[in-house]
Image: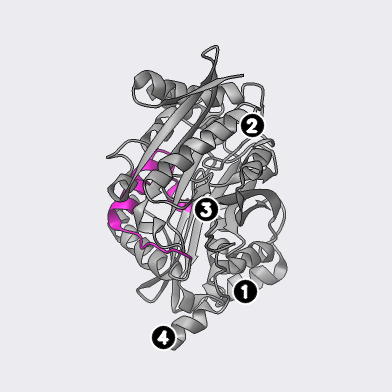
Amino acid sequence: MEYRLMSVADKRSRNLFHDVMRLVYKNDKNFVCPPDDLIEGTFTPGRNLFFAQGEATRWILVDENNKLAGRVAAFINTKKAYTFQVPTGGMGFFECINDYKAAEILFNACRSWLSERGMEAMDGPINFGENDNFWGLLVEGFIPQSFGMNYNPAYYKDFFEKYGFTLYFDQVTNLLDLTKPFPERFWKIADWVRKKPEYSFRHFSYKESEKFVADFIVVYNDAWQFHENFTPAEPESVLTMLTGMKSFLVPEFVWFAYHGDEPIAFELMLPDMNQMLRYFNGKAKWWGKLKVALIGKKHIFTRTRIVIMGVKPLYQKSGIESAMFWHMNEVMKSKPQFAEVELSWVGDFNPKMRMLHEAVGAKFSKRHITYRKYFGEIHGEGRSTVIPIDTRDKVTRKS
């Protein structure tokens, strides 16, 4: 079979880019098609703030009969690309029929485009945005995925590894069964911490959104400072994220912890929108939103996803995380339709968070891999840098 690569450059090719997903997964009952408009926003300057610090392009692949065979995107985040040992771009939104020849053409397109712009490696499949959405290749746990989590056929793993992609970091998602009690020791710690007078806990409210956005940034920039290639959060990006979530964000699902007036931790949990979006095959528009409202009244949502959680290093190992889970669990008691919480995802570079998942009693659910492909013989890091266990001590010593 012969194939032809086409750049996505007009309305027709943009529509075909989205239709590739419907082709690849037409017989897969586990797949939930993300809204076309959501994906399109990733590639729209003005909607995606990452265009202010980079660029992106994408292609579709057709066969000799002009039938869709695949798609892919390549992008460069200039704030991060040059923080690695070799300049590293990204590729993602990869979809392909079960033919390695087609996959190789798509991989080569990304490699050539990135090489022309000075990149010497590419990570994939990743997102042209934050890593909470569309990040990593699913290699274990081929079950219905939650909103924002990548899902793909099992044969993609062979495609990536045959091309020369190697594991850069491993991503694990765990599942918390709310119908089962938390470990007793965990609750004892949570109860002890939450009653300390110096600590207070508040959930998000739109009336004070500016305060909570500012508190989020303070905690995030402190908590993530030891992550590899850390880039500080900025108000504009956080406000954009908040605006995008407004239609489905539940204020009581977002918690902040304070030591006196100092914000020290946060937790962001969202209903799993895929439990609703599976009815629309990526075509949810205004009429879809009306159906969402009606369906929502029938308690269609039974699962939530903790998208991100952070604690300032100085307050880690103090039980704050346990107290945050205590408050979350109290909210869930008033919403018995929710039976499980997905804790996604935690990289193997973050052992402390993986230990927290174990402590709360969460069980393994799925595994993704972020791969890296080096273009030449000069390689940088073989694996992502592990966040030190002693970050609290590091902060203490600095202060």
Extreme residue toward the top, this view: 65
Seen at 62% across and 66% down, the residue is: 356
Cα–Cα span, label 4 and label 1:
28 Å
Instruction: Tell whether label 1 touches label 2 (CB within 8 Å).
Output: no
Q: Nearer the viewer, mark 2 or mark 1?
A: 2
- Residue with the mark numbered 4: 398
Disc 1: CA contacts within 10 A as few (<14), some (14-19) or many (>=20): some
Determine the CA span between mark 1 and mark 3: 51 Å
Instruction: Check disc 2 and report its element: helix, strand or loop.
Output: helix
Amino acid carrying mark 2 in the image? Tyr
Q: Amino acid at mark 3?
A: Gly
| Region in magenta | 228-253
**Residue 26 can be seen in this image:** yes
Answer with mark 2 or mark 4, whichever residue precedes in sequence: 2
Q: What is the distance, in whole Å, between disc 2 and disc 3 at their CAs?
A: 22 Å
Name the kind of residue labelled 4 in the image.
Lys
Q: Which mark is residue 291?
A: none
| Image quarter hosting the C terminus | bottom left
Question: Could you tell me which secondary element the residue under label 3 belongs to?
Answer: loop
Q: Which residue is mark 3?
A: 376
- From the image, tell me which residue sits under label 1: 189
Report the residue marked by disc 2: 100
214 inside magenta stretch: no
Q: Earlier in the sequence, mark 1 or mark 3?
A: 1
Q: Mark 1 near mark 3, Cβ–Cβ under 8 Å?
A: no
Residue 273 seen in this snapshot: no
Estimate the x, y position of residue 203 in percent, counting from the top left: 43, 58
Q: Earlier in the sequence, mark 4 or mark 1?
A: 1
Secondary structure at badge 1 equals helix
Q: In this rendering, which labeled residue sits more in front, label 2 or label 4?
A: 2
The CA distance from mark 2 to mark 1 is 52 Å
